């Protein structure tokens, strides 16, 4: 049994981490919840018991914690996560603070759990859209090799947290947005996070860089366009992938159907393809609309959907924790 901490317990992802820990029947001796002073003292019902939210301060270093799941933003992670890790706490961080740091594993369990080890106690949880995309790409990379990937993401407002959801609801009432620069209701915004000097947004750059790191393919050609859409939850990504070796559509489907974490929904004759509504509340990655690109050799199109708050954040973090305790148990 383990003493587990959730840092950022009152946020959307933090709350979902608590839900997933409960659903997965994670072996918890004591659950400790941390948030800002504003939330300290409030209680959360977990498995029929009231758990008091604690204020996050330096006192956490003296608390008996075995595993800490962080979802409180990069600055909080940078302040607390390294020292906890140095003390031997398994820290799984959902921010972008450590993702591209050398020596820190960036993990999607279906793809690269082999990079986990008991000695590496600070682990980064990837970007939500990257997670679902590499779950679909990894089995193709293993069988055929990859030379190029082009993403277009259609990202739900829950990816912006409660502020994004509020803007969608505000727009439905005819009110102006307070989070996005333009209305998201009845609109799409080709702009997620800040613009960089190269013309890409930070979200797009994350997908490109993280894909290369997770797939251990530093020279892989990757490009991305990330779009915010007026959907409450679950991201969709259109993936165009060029393989090193050719395959048929049937072969690509067969590889994906057998891959861990994937649900293949691909039957055009019956209008079977995944939508955000299919993915909501689940931890699988749904793939469909698989077809050959007749304009480029060895190139295929995939449509990939997943719950961005669960598989794209909370569930992936808990799954990493499961992998870590499994390694510890077998040492």
Image (spheres, rainbow, N blue to C red):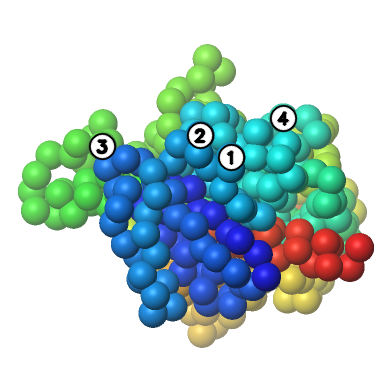
The nearer-to-camera label among 3 and 1 is 1
Residue at horizontal 19 percent and vertical 36 percent from the top: 178
Q: Is residue 37 left or right of residue 159?
A: left
Of residue 62 and residue 12, the one placed in the foreground of this image is 62
Q: Are marks 3 and 2 in contact (CB under 8 Å)?
A: no
N-terminal label among 1 and 4: 1
Q: Are marks 2 and 1 in contact (CB under 8 Å)?
A: yes
The residues tagged by marks 4 and 3 sit, at their Cα atoms, a distance apart of 30 Å
Residue 327: name its quadrant.
bottom right
Relative vertical location of residue 326 with respect to residue 246 in this rendering, above or below:
below
The residues tagged by marks 3 and 2 sit, at their Cα atoms, a distance apart of 31 Å
Q: Are marks 2 and 4 in contact (CB under 8 Å)?
A: no
Residue 58, label in figure? 2
Q: Residues within 10 Å of mark 4 (few under 14, many from 20)?
A: few
Query: Which residue is labeled 4 in the image?
Result: 101
Of residue 47 and residue 209, the one placed in the foreground of this image is 47
Q: Position of residue 131 (x, y in %)?
A: 62, 53
Q: Are marks 4 and 3 in contact (CB under 8 Å)?
A: no
Residue at horizontal 45 percent and vertical 55 percent from the top: 33
Q: Are marks 1 and 4 in contact (CB under 8 Å)?
A: no
Element class at badge 2: helix
The residues tagged by marks 3 and 1 sit, at their Cα atoms, a distance apart of 34 Å
Of residue 152 and residue 285, the one placed in the foreground of this image is 285
The residues tagged by marks 2 and 1 sit, at their Cα atoms, a distance apart of 6 Å
Regarding residue 78, the answer to whether it shows in the image is: yes
Q: Residues within 10 Å of mark 3 (few under 14, many from 20)?
A: some
């Amino acid at each position: 049994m383990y003493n587990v901490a959730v840092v950022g317990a009152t946020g959307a992802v933090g709350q979902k981490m608590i839900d997933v820990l409960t659903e997965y029947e994670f072996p918890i001796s004591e659950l400790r919840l941390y948030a800002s002073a504003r939330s300290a003292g409030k209680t959360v019902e977990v498995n029929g018991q009231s758990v008091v939210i604690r204020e996050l301060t330096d006192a956490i270093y003296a608390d008996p914690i075995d595993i800490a799941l962080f979802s409180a933003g990069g600055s909080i992670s940078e302040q607390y996560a390294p020292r906890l890790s140095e003390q031997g706490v398994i820290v799984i961080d959902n921010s972008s603070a450590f993702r591209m740091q050398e020596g820190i594993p960036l993990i999607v369990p279906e793809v690269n759990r082999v990079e986990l080890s008991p000695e590496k106690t600070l682990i980064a949880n990837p970007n939500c859209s990257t997670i679902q995309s590499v779950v679909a790409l990894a089995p193709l990379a293993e069988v055929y090799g990859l030379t190029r990937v082009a993403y277009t993401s259609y990202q739900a407002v829950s990816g912006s947290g409660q502020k994004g959801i509020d803007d969608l609801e505000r727009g439905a009432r005819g009110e102006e947005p307070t989070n996005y620069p333009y209305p998201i209701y009845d609109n799409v915004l080709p702009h997620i996070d800040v613009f960089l000097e190269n013309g890409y947004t930070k979200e797009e750059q994350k997908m490109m860089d993280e894909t290369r790191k997770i797939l251990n393919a530093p020279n892989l050609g990757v490009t991305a366009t990330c779009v915010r859409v007026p959907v409450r939850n679950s991201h969709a990504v259109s993936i165009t992938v060029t393989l090193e070796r050719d395959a048929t559509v049937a072969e690509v489907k067969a590889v994906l159907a057998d891959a861990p974490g994937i649900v293949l929904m691909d039957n055009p004759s019956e209008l079977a393809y995944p939508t955000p509504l299919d993915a909501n509340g689940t931890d699988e990655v749904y793939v469909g609309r698989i077809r050959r690109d007749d304009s480029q050799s060895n190139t295929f199109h995939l449509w990939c959907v997943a719950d961005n708050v669960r598989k794209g954040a909370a569930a992936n973090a808990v799954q990493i924790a499961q992998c870590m305790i499994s390694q510890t148990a077998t040492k």
